[in-house]
Image (tube, rainbow, N blue to C red):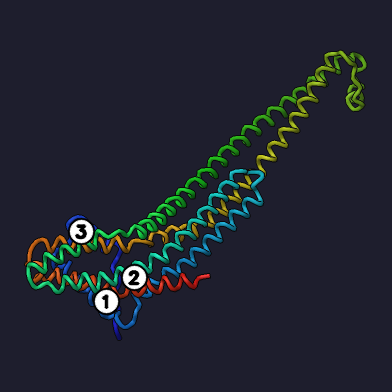
């Protein structure tokens, strides 16, 4: 029976990763890793799984679309239910709809960029890397440096514009979440404070009215004198002698009773708003996983040209060191790795562009 090796513990991983961070890796370890990548690419050459990994970004686009729809629907529902109570919800909804439109615009651009990038990878692989591999003389090396310089300096601003658009959108969406949470927290705190203040006012009014009732009864009994026994009847009938201190006290009680009633209504409204805000928070918290998916996927778009450009300049700098680079095994392996990566990446980008072209 085959025994499956146990997965490394988290502690082991932490130690290993910490060592790489502090001590780096040896040349031997780096060489082994590069060769390992080449071996994996060779294994995949007939299966196309790596190309599929790239093209799956187009399928992610559908996931992101679905997430945008969920968030938009959720915010619309919040606004329909509680927009009158919380006007800022309308602003948040409008802002989110703007993000959705930007996403559609950038995604459309990414389809065109994917086709361009596939063509760039084809040239990188079949032209420029082949030039490097074909170096035989020092003049060949000098010519290769010039060709690589020319290639690296080509104006490919569209990929960067697209990448920057996705990065900015990602940052804006993350900022949106922070601001929405802050608004909920601030509004919740304000409502809680209002409720506490109203409860204090209501309690004070209740005490004042109770005290007035006692004083009114005492004053009524005193004014009735020997007829104090009918004080209860007078109170029930509500007969008042105008102009007396008792009339003024009763008027004050009426005012306080009206104020108490109004404050209770205010408290009921604040409590209703608190309940509504709790529903808003719960609903928005439920949307956060979809927002997180959007941000995660956006960060993966548009980095191809910058990688090709960086590789080109790295190879160029190595060649500037002289003919020794041509016989350097590590340099040869890096060229081999770059070429082997180009194929699945190019195929994946072409499929990505096709999938987006056929996307509804």
* Residue at the disc numbered 2: 118
Instruction: Classify 4 as above or below 82.
Output: below
Position in image of residue 98 (x %, y %) = 52, 52
Dot 1: within a 10 Å radius of its alpha carbon, few (fewer than 14), some, or many (20 or more) residues? Answer: many
**Element under disc 3:** helix
In the picture provided, is 217 more to the left or to the right than 349? right
In the picture provided, is 155 more to the left or to the right than 171? left
**Element under disc 2:** helix
Which residue: 57% across, 50% down? 94
Q: Nearer the viewer, residue 78 or 66?
A: 66
The answer to whether residue 160 is seen in the rendering is: yes
Position in image of residue 161 (x %, y %) = 38, 56
| Number of dots carrying numbers | 3
State how far apart marks 3 and 2 are (Cα).
37 Å
Mark nearest the camera among 2 and 1 is 2
Q: Quadrant of residue 317?
A: bottom left
**Where's the N terminus, which quadrant?**
bottom left
**Element under disc 1:** helix
Q: Nearer the viewer, residue 253 or 85?
A: 85
Q: Earlier in the sequence, mark 2 or mark 1?
A: 1
State how far apart marks 2 and 1 are (Cα).
18 Å
Q: Earlier in the sequence, mark 3 or mark 2?
A: 3
Instruction: Classify 136 as above or below 194.
Output: below
Which residue: 27% across, 80% down? 43
Q: Earlier in the sequence, mark 3 or mark 1?
A: 3
* Residue at the disc numbered 3: 19
């Amino acid at each position: 029976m085959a025994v499956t090796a146990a997965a490394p513990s988290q502690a082991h991983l932490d130690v290993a990763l910490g060592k790489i961070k502090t001590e780096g890796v040896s040349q031997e370890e780096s060489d082994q890793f590069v060769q390992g990548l080449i071996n994996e690419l060779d294994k995949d050459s007939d299966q196309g799984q790596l190309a599929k990994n790239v093209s799956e970004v187009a399928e992610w686009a559908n996931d992101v679309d679905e997430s945008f729809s969920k968030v938009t629907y959720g915010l619309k529902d919040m606004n329909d239910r509680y927009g009158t109570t919380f006007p800022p919800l309308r602003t948040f909804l409008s802002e989110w709809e703007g993000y959705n439109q930007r996403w559609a615009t950038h995604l459309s651009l990414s389809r065109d960029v994917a086709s361009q990038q596939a063509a760039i990878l084809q040239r990188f692989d079949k032209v420029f890397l082949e030039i490097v591999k074909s170096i035989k003389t020092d003049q060949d090396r000098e010519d290769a440096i010039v060709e690589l310089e020319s290639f690296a300096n080509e104006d490919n601003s569209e990929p960067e514009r697209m990448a920057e658009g996705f990065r900015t959108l990602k940052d804006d969406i993350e900022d949106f979440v922070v601001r929405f949470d802050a608004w909920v927290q601030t509004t919740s705190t304000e409502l809680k404070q209002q409720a506490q203040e109203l409860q204090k006012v209501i309690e004070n009014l209740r005490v004042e009215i109770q005290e007035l009732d006692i004083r009114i009864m005492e004053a009524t009994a005193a004014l009735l004198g020997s007829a104090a026994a009918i004080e209860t009847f007078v109170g029930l009938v509500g007969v008042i002698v105008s102009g007396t201190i008792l009339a003024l006290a009763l008027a004050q009680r009426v005012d306080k009773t009206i104020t108490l009633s109004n404050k209770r209504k205010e408290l009921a409204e604040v409590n209703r708003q608190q309940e509504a805000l709790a529903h808003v928070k719960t609903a928005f918290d439920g949307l956060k996983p979809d927002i997180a998916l959007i941000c995660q996927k956006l960060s993966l778009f548009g980095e191809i040209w910058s990688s090709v450009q960086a590789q080109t300049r790295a190879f160029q700098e190595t060649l500037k060191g002289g003919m020794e680079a041509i016989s350097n095994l590590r340099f040869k392996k890096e060229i081999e790795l770059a070429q082997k990566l180009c194929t699945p990446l190019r195929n994946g980008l072409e499929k990505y562009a096709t999938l987006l072209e056929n996307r509804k």
